Image (cartoon, rainbow, N blue to C red):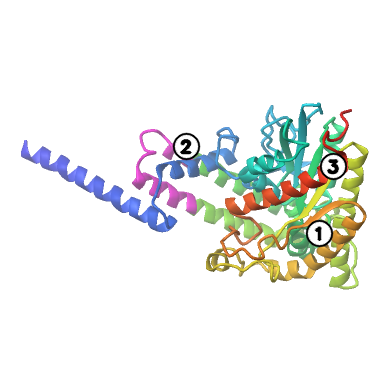
Amino acid sequence: MKKPLFALFTIALVSVAVEALSYAALSFHEKAWASRSVLTARRDQVLASSGEIDPYKATLPSYMRPTVLHPYLGYVMDDPTERDPYGFLNYFPIVQKRSSDKIIVAITGGSVALQLYDNAIDTLIEELKTGEAFKDREIVAVRFAVGGYKQPQQLIALNYLLAVGGEYDIVINIDGFNEAVLSLSENVPKGVSPLFPRNWALQVGPLSDERLLSYVYEGARIRKARVVLARAFGARIVRDSYALHLVWENLDRFLLARKFRINREANKRYGAARTYLAQGPSRAYADDEQLRAEIVDVWQRCSRLMSELSKANGIEYFHFLQPSQYLPGSKPLTDVEMREAVSTEIDYGTHLKSVYPRMIAAGHELKKEGVHFKDLTILFASDYRTMYSDTCCHLNKEGYRIMAREIAKYVRQRYRVSTGSEGPAVR
């Protein structure tokens, strides 16, 4: 009996040691104690991104979910459901109808608007309810925001949703970074119209370029492989093992590295897609100043049109220029932000510094014209806490809560002044 018992004891001891070492390795990599719930959520993200599980129950951030081409909007999220068949991943029907007992708030913009909804919509609603016009009425908040959206996508989305019968009391547009940066860093260098959706040549290039189509095919194979792995390692018998999760995570990282290499090759191929479908209308600019001026003019004009369209439909429109860590003097950056929220690879800063001052000035012009515009670029000017979460433009949860409170306060005050305590007339 001694030998079998010794063998079992040895196996148990080795298993415990392997689990302990795996736990330590995972904790070291995450810079926090490893959590089974967090590890499970990470696998769920992979499954949600391919429709394997209900996207509403997954922890995958909305702005990271896959998109699909759309005939009017460029693209929407590829998660149509009964709750939102229009591709904006809403928890309530996006085509709302007005009634005297509720106020319908629609939020639009890019990934910052999306993340604000995910992280701080409750904060925004709570702050709104402190106003006389809101406190005795239900607030229904929907969104038509998608990661990467930039004008005129918000304007077209509002037209589209009104066309299919949507009725809203308030539209909140949170934008600026994508318009200022994505056109200059992604579209223009590839010969794509700065007014076209981001990465447009890559999205439609495969329709006319076999090489790009092969990259799409390979990307689909990798996505399927990641789903198969996530499903296998998510089985009940193995999901509680730190060692097996460590194995899964390394395999998944290997596949992700392959995906990134393919994406780089596809980006290099952009230039080969010299078709009108991929590039849109061409225009020669006298210099960079003229290009930047047009980007800001279109942004300003779209906001003006959204305001006029809203007014014609009994909607109060509010426009907010989002903050950015790349705008000098807008925030004292912490060591964490300098290390984790300032890009050393993509020159966001140069583009933003050249466009944002123009946007701030254009926003003041909108304000003089009667548009509800507020500049949020100095929201964190005296805040020494860490607020930015990545090298793009996104905030942590506390940052979004602060922004939500500021937005709601401005909306609450202007809504009361411009419409009275009863809100817009119900049609």
The residue pinned by badge 3 equals 316
Q: How far across and how far down the image is residue 408, in percent?
A: 72, 46
* Alpha carbon separation for disc pair 1 and 2: 39 Å
Q: How far across and how far down the image is residue 15, in percent?
A: 25, 45
- Which mark, residue 192? 1
Q: Which amino acid does label 2 sit on?
A: Arg
Dot 3 or dot 2: first in sequence order is 2
- What secondary structure characterizes most of the magenta part? helix
Q: Which amino acid does label 1 sit on?
A: Val
The number of discs equals 3
Q: Is mark 3 on a helix, strand or loop?
A: strand
Q: In which quarter of the image is the C terminus?
A: top right
Relative horizontal placement of residue 257, taking residue 118 as reference (left or right) = left
- The answer to whether residue 401 is seen in the rendering is yes
Relative horizontal placement of residue 186, taking residue 157 as reference (left or right) = left
Q: How far across and how far down the image is residue 240, in percent?
A: 36, 39
- Read off the magenta span: 229-253
Q: Is mark 1 on a helix, strand or loop?
A: loop
Q: Measured along the vertical axis of the image, is residue 412 above or below residue 382? A: above
- Which mark, residue 231? 2
* Alpha carbon separation for disc pair 3 and 2: 46 Å
Marks 1 & 3, CB-CB < 8 Å contact: no
Mark 1 crowd level (few <14, some 14–19, many ≥20, 10 Å Cα): many
